[in-house]
Image (cartoon, rainbow, N blue to C red):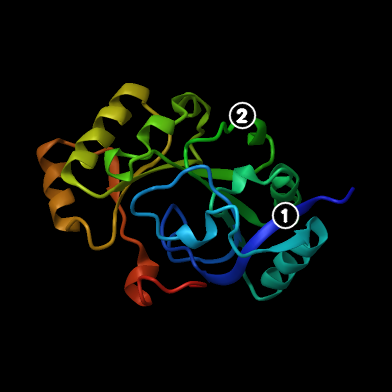
């Protein structure tokens, strides 16, 4: 049986956040998620009935090859939660072998262990209190992260920023740590003041570039 995937959308844009922010990337968004964050900005892709096209690995490879021909070297597997796709490891490995930098955006509620040998890098969320989903976090993932990976703390409140500091001090992930404010919920300047007061020199504040360039609710950007 051929490997298939629930592809909600695919498009080329810039990376809005992460270590390659501002670089062109192919985004492959997969349908379905095991969390329901209060502030989710892609909720339309999360439900069991989320609109999607069932595609094969060959089709994903064709989409990626077209992007490469247009000068794109990054591909982001996102969602929803991409690690819920049964054959996502095969897709990540194939895309890495094609010469692209493959980034998997994952919500922190799925084990990373089965995907460490794919060649992909992880941008892993840790869901803070304002998300309503912190209880679902798989904290054992912190020990699996490598220097090339990223932890993203999406902050919707002052409490979230303090909690991010606590988590970082407890688990000490050996990779870059980003604070990403929920658009319209907390002033980025307030996060900076907390960072200064709490001596959070190991963190980086990052704004979602795509929400400043385009309409914050726009899809496919």
Q: Quadrant of residue 86?
A: top right
Q: Residue at x 44, y 52 (%)?
A: 19
**Near-viewer residue (210 or 117):** 210
Q: Where's residue 157, x and y in %?
A: 20, 47
Q: Residue at x 43, y 66 (%)?
A: 22
Q: Where's residue 133, x and y in %?
A: 38, 38
* Residues packed near mark 2 inside 10 Å, few (<14), some (14 to 19) or many (20 plus): few
- What residue is disc 2 on? 113
* 6 to the left or right of 145: right
Mark number for residue 5?
1
* Residues packed near mark 1 inside 10 Å, few (<14), some (14 to 19) or many (20 plus): many
Count of marks overlaid on the render: 2
Quick check: 1 above or below 9? above
Element type where label 2 sits in the image = helix
**Near-viewer residue (128 or 50):** 50
* 104 to the left or right of 158: right
* Of labels 1 and 2, the one closer to you: 1
Q: Where's residue 127, x and y in %?
A: 37, 40
Mark number for residue 57?
none
Q: Spatial distance from mark 1 to mark 2, Cα to Cα?
A: 20 Å
Residues tagged 1 and 2 counted as in contact (Cβ below 8 A): no
Q: Residue furthest front?
A: 49
């Amino acid at each position: 049986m051929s490997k298939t995937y629930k592809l909600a959308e695919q498009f080329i844009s810039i990376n809005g956040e992460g270590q390659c922010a501002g670089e062109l990337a192919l985004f492959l968004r997969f349908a379905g998620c095991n969390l329901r964050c209060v502030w989710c900005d892609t909720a339309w892709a999360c439900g069991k009935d989320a609109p999607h096209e069932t595609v094969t690995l060959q089709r994903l490879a064709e989409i990626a090859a077209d992007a490469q021909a247009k000068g794109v070297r990054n591909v982001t597997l996102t969602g929803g939660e991409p690690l819920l796709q049964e054959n996502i490891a095969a897709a990540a490995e194939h895309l890495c072998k094609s010469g692209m930098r493959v980034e998997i955006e994952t919500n922190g509620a799925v084990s990373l262990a089965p995907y460490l040998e794919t060649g992909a890098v992880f941008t892993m969320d840790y869901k803070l209190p304002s998300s309503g989903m912190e209880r679902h976090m798989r904290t054992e993932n912190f020990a699996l992260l490598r220097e090339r990976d990223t932890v993203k703390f999406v902050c919707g409140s002052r409490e979230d920023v303090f909690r991010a500091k606590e988590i970082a001090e407890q688990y000490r992930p050996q990779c870059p740590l980003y604070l990403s404010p929920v658009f319209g919920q907390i002033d980025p300047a307030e996060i900076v003041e907390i960072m200064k007061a709490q001596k959070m020199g190991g963190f980086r504040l990052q704004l979602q570039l795509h929400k400043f360039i385009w309409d914050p609710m726009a899809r496919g950007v």
